[in-house]
Amino acid sequence: MKKHLLIITLLAGNFIAISQNNIITVSNNLPVDREFETIELTKKSLGLNENAKLEDYVIKNGNIFLETQTVDHDGDGTADLLLFQPKIKASSKQDFEVLVGKNPSTSTVLNCYSRFVPERTDDYAWENNKVAFRTYGPVAQKMVEDKIAGGTLTSGIDAWLKRVDYPIINKWYEKATNGTGTYHKDTGEGLDNFHVGDSRGVGGIAVNVDGKYYFSKNFISWKTITTGPIRTSFILTYADWDAKGNKVTESKLISLDYGSQLSRFEINITGSKTISAGLTLHDKKGTIGTNLKEGWLSYWEPIDDSEIGTGLVVPKGNLISFDHHVTNEKDLSNQYGNISVKNKKAIYYVGFGWKKGSPFQTKQEWEKYLSSFAEKINNPLIVKVKK
């Protein structure tokens, strides 16, 4: 994986042009400026032979190099994707060059980061410059089942409320494990005060059979695909589970891109034609927001001395309905979005905006973001490549 720092000047000796440069035209058909949307290029889309290495290519706009990241998605040792994030004005298009060369500097900061965390039982945690999340593994589950203190039994997704744009996962875990501090107290960078328990947290899934919700336990295996300046992605696999006699298999491909409040979840599942992705209602003191036509749901609630909005966005045509599921059972009240499963897959985006760590200060501002996010994923930037 190459990580290229955005630079302004072109330095001689660090750049080699090729006789036939690829020109990429990126078109924005929406009447709004767009940024923090990731373009994925493949060797095939660039017309490169199979022996070419995407790590050898850079993207340039005028005299400016754009930050890029390569991803070996299938784990065969060869990069499959070249990522970049253009800035495109409303209702306009812009050209970029793809060239063989090297940038004079490389980024050392992994803004989009994830890893398995064995020193904190066995969490898996991920973050970008806006938000952070974690979920829980088999050791944490077994501790609960064996009645050992400190375990966690849930396939719900936890939100880490960061208020800085630099990475915090390693720093927070380190101070918690070496006894110098706790991530449950905000000392200026944010904190973990978001309760998950048996709830779906921020986007955990369930299967509804005859009005009752069933869900998996903790993940049983993990695989990190990539970390870098633009994207982190990974796979979590779960033990087969039962939904009233239906055997369900489940794995999650999760990715989080730079600048986004929402992680992308691609659920690979058998045993159900629909899934229900949930947002925990905690003590039910918040306010629900739903928009079936645009494909999103939200929950805006107080949290300690602040407020937080959680939200879920589903690509057009895949969100079937909502269920405001309220119960007296501890942690089991969730706002569900019911999503169709097609070809054993279901895709949605889920995340949060914390009042202290984001520009969203009201429910209305948060829901405007979700509405805009939905419009953009349903009208992606159009990319054309020519030599």
Image (tube, rainbow, N blue to C red):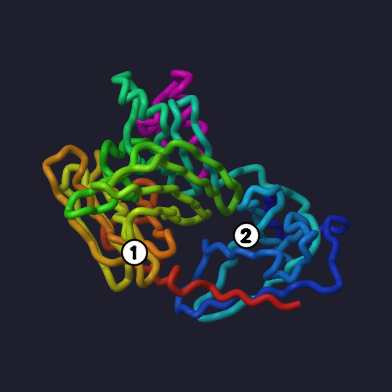
* Amino acid type for the residue under numbered disc 2: Leu
Work out whether residue 154 can be spotted. Answer: yes
Q: In this orientation, which residue lies closer to the viewer: 211 or 191?
A: 211
Percent of width and height locating residue 362: 27, 57
Q: Which residues are magenta?
A: 165-188
282 left or right, relative to 15? left
Q: Disc 2 designates what residue? A: 83
* Amino acid type for the residue under numbered disc 1: Ser
Q: Is residue 221 above or below residue 106?
A: above
Q: Quadrant of residue 187?
A: top left
Determine crowd level at label 2: few under 14, some 14-19, many 20+ residues with C-alpha closer than 10 A: many
Q: Residue at x 46, y 39 (%)?
A: 125
For the residue labelled by badge 2, is the local secondary structure a helix, a strand or a loop?
strand
Q: Residue at x 26, y 47 (%)?
A: 245
Does the magenta portion include 102?
no
The C terminus - image quarter: bottom right
Badge 2 vs badge 1, beta-carbon distance below 8 Å: no
User: Main SS of the magenta segment?
Assistant: loop
Determine crowd level at label 1: few under 14, some 14-19, many 20+ residues with C-alpha closer than 10 A: many
In 3D space, how far apart are the residues under numbered discs 2 and 1 (Cα atoms)? 29 Å
Q: Residue at x 55, y 48 (%)?
A: 232
Q: Disc 1 designates what residue? A: 340
362 left or right, relative to 28? left
